[in-house]
Amino acid sequence: RKQVDTVIGAVDGLLGSITQGGTLLNFVVDSLGNIVQSVTNTAGQAVDSIVGNYLNNMTFTGVTSSLGNGLTQKQYSYSPLNALVNIVFNAAGQIVGQPSVVKQTSTASSTTASATATPVSLTTTSAATTTSAS
């Protein structure tokens, strides 16, 4: 059951994917609000690296919903991958549950050639290295 929950959580939190040097890089937001880059190495194992978080790399959209019981849902935008993310917080400001991606307007790809997959920082300052396809 835990593996199923992990897979479902990863799908709900998938910000998007890019191709870099022929390697597919998936970006997910985890239950702590970290932006995680996941790449499969040559041995077929997933290698995850934290490359950012919602506070430093996402923009609060101003959309807030009160869910009751002291829970508040806030929406954030992750512009490098055109994703909108809902994150639920408790009264103490802690993330509750798995953030969910509610909208992706397009996919992004990178044309950077690389012999090995390395973590890339997808901040608004590096947006020039990604291209969006409609």
Image (tube, rainbow, N blue to C red):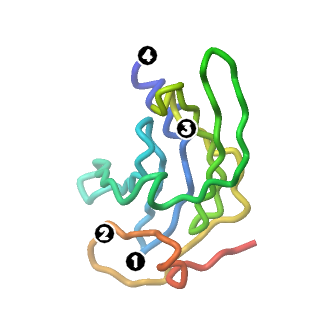
In the rendered structure, which amino acid carries the disc numbered 4?
Arg
Which of the two labelled residues, at mark 1 and mark 3, occupies the earlier sequence position? 1
Residue that label 1 marks: 21
Disc marking residue 99: 3
Task: Tell whether label 4 touches label 1 (CB within 8 Å).
Answer: no
Q: In the figure, 117 relative to 15: above or below?
A: below
Which of the two labelled residues, at mark 2 and mark 3, occupies the earlier sequence position? 3
The quadrant holding residue 67 is top right
Which of the two labelled residues, at mark 4 and mark 3, occupies the earlier sequence position? 4
The C terminus sits in image quarter: bottom right
Which of the two labelled residues, at mark 2 and mark 1, occupies the earlier sequence position? 1
Q: Provide residue 130's location: percent of width, then percent of height.
A: 54, 78
Disc 2 versus disc 3: distance between alpha carbons? 26 Å
Q: Residue at x 43, y 61 (%)?
A: 25
Nearest the camera: 8 or 82? 82
Which of the two labelled residues, at mark 1 and mark 4, occupies the earlier sequence position? 4
Instruction: Please name which of the two marks, 4 or 3, marks the residue nearer to the observer.
Output: 3
Disc 1 versus disc 4: distance between alpha carbons? 35 Å
